[in-house]
Amino acid sequence: MIKRLLLIVGFIVSLSSCGEDIAYRIEGKLTNLEDQTLYAVFENDDIKAVDTVICEKSGQFLIERKQGDFREVTIFFEDKTHWVTVYPEKGEKVTITGDANYPTMLRVKGGHINDRLSAIKKELASLLKEQADLIHQLHNRGKESVNNTIEETDVASRLANVNHLLSEEVAAAVKKYPDEEASVILIQNYFMHPDDTRRMDELLAVLNPKLKDFYLVQKLQEYSARAKRTALGAEAPGFNVKNIYGAPVSLDSFPQRYLLLAFTAPWCDMCQTEDLYLDKVATKYPKDKVDMLLISLDDNQSEVRKVLAKDSIDWNLVTDSAGQAAMLVDLYNVSALPRCFLIDEEGKIILKTDNGMEIKHTLENLIE
């Protein structure tokens, strides 16, 4: 009898210790969740771990991790088209509730950062819902074979107004809570603009200096410095790479001419040279007037050479072999593809765009 009691006590103790071993516990209950498979990405500076999670009941899930030191957990759902980010604290249970159709409105409870962000979301609920509904309308109109241009323009105008109102409300929240990490996250979510960091810099300046060691503050400061490096009017960052034929290429390889840097990728539908007007630039302007360097996130150099051999245009192209393209993407702070930079004869950036017609009109105005 004593042995049986000892075994029972030992079993209870072992269960308790197992519970204590769980560093992170996230429980979710989402309505309107169609895809019952989710992916939880745990992240820190040097570590990224991915868990696949299956809902035990419709819309209900449990994510647990016994080990690790993570700052963020991003949970992807609806075939990875939607997501919500959690800022966990070890030993603190986190709950996620709300409508899966409105990911920006999901309520995340547990831990001071999550609680503050959820409180701010609650205050912004009407704007967040209107924003999501307008984005949904635009997305659906894009799928229609015949679009009503007037209605589409109206929806886009309303969305721009809602976005502006949201940014103003978020900026007010940052100023209201300058001592809290949640404010830094709001700055990251709403004001990280690759072309203009003035608002982000302004809001970073109002934060309490005690937050300087919070990991996102340094990240945003570095982001701002990179953005300024490629601001309009800035000296274009120098580089030394090799093109797909092994020839060295640097900024000095294009003296006394306009240089068009075009960042592309083979899997990017909008990156085709004809869509970006690059083929017409190559045939219309002599290289001593306008030269071009394509940077493609493509590792297969031999295949690229085969494709280029069939092209009538002599493209100067750098691929991601040995991380060259990735290095240039970071150097020029490219956050989305396609991305084109026009550099003038003095080495200054005079245009940043993803629009081929803008490239066309700018060059016509400059040269013709």
Image (cartoon, helix red, strand yellow):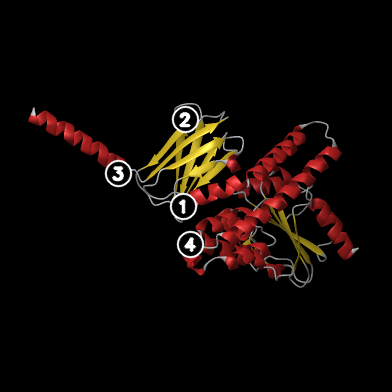
Which quadrant of the rendered structure holds the C terminus?
A: bottom right
In the picture provided, is 320 more to the left or to the right than 5? right
> Where's residue 336, x and y in %?
66, 51
Comes first in the chain, label 2 or label 3: 3
> Where's residue 32, x and y in %?
58, 29
Nearest to the eye among marks 2 and 1: give it: 1
Q: Residues within 10 Å of mark 3 (few under 14, many from 20)?
A: few
Comes first in the chain, label 1 or label 3: 3
Is the C-beta separation of discs 1 and 3 under 8 Å? no
- The one nearer the camera, 158 or 274, is 158
Which quadrant of the rendered structure holds the N terminus?
A: top left
Determine which residue is flagged by label 2.
Answer: 55
Could you tell me how far apart the alpha carbons at marks 1 and 3 are, in whole angstroms?
21 Å
> Where's residue 253, x and y in %?
71, 68
Residue under the point 55% across and 36% down = 98
Q: Is residue 289 above or below residue 86?
A: below
Determine which residue is flagged by label 3.
Answer: 20
Comes first in the chain, label 4 or label 2: 2
Q: Is residue 40 visible?
A: yes
Could you tell me how far apart the alpha carbons at marks 2 and 3 are, in whole angstroms?
23 Å
Could you tell me how far apart the alpha carbons at marks 4 and 2 are, in whole angstroms?
34 Å
Could you tell me how far apart the alpha carbons at marks 2 and 1 are, in whole angstroms?
27 Å
Q: Residues within 10 Å of mark 2 (few under 14, many from 20)?
A: some
Residue under the point 73% across and 45% down = 270
Is the C-beta separation of discs 1 and 4 under 8 Å? no
Comes first in the chain, label 1 or label 4: 1
Q: Say which amino acid is labelled 3.
A: Glu
Residue 214 is marked as: 4
Q: Say which amino acid is labelled 2.
A: Cys
Determine which residue is flagged by label 1.
Answer: 112
Q: Residues within 10 Å of mark 4 (few under 14, many from 20)?
A: few
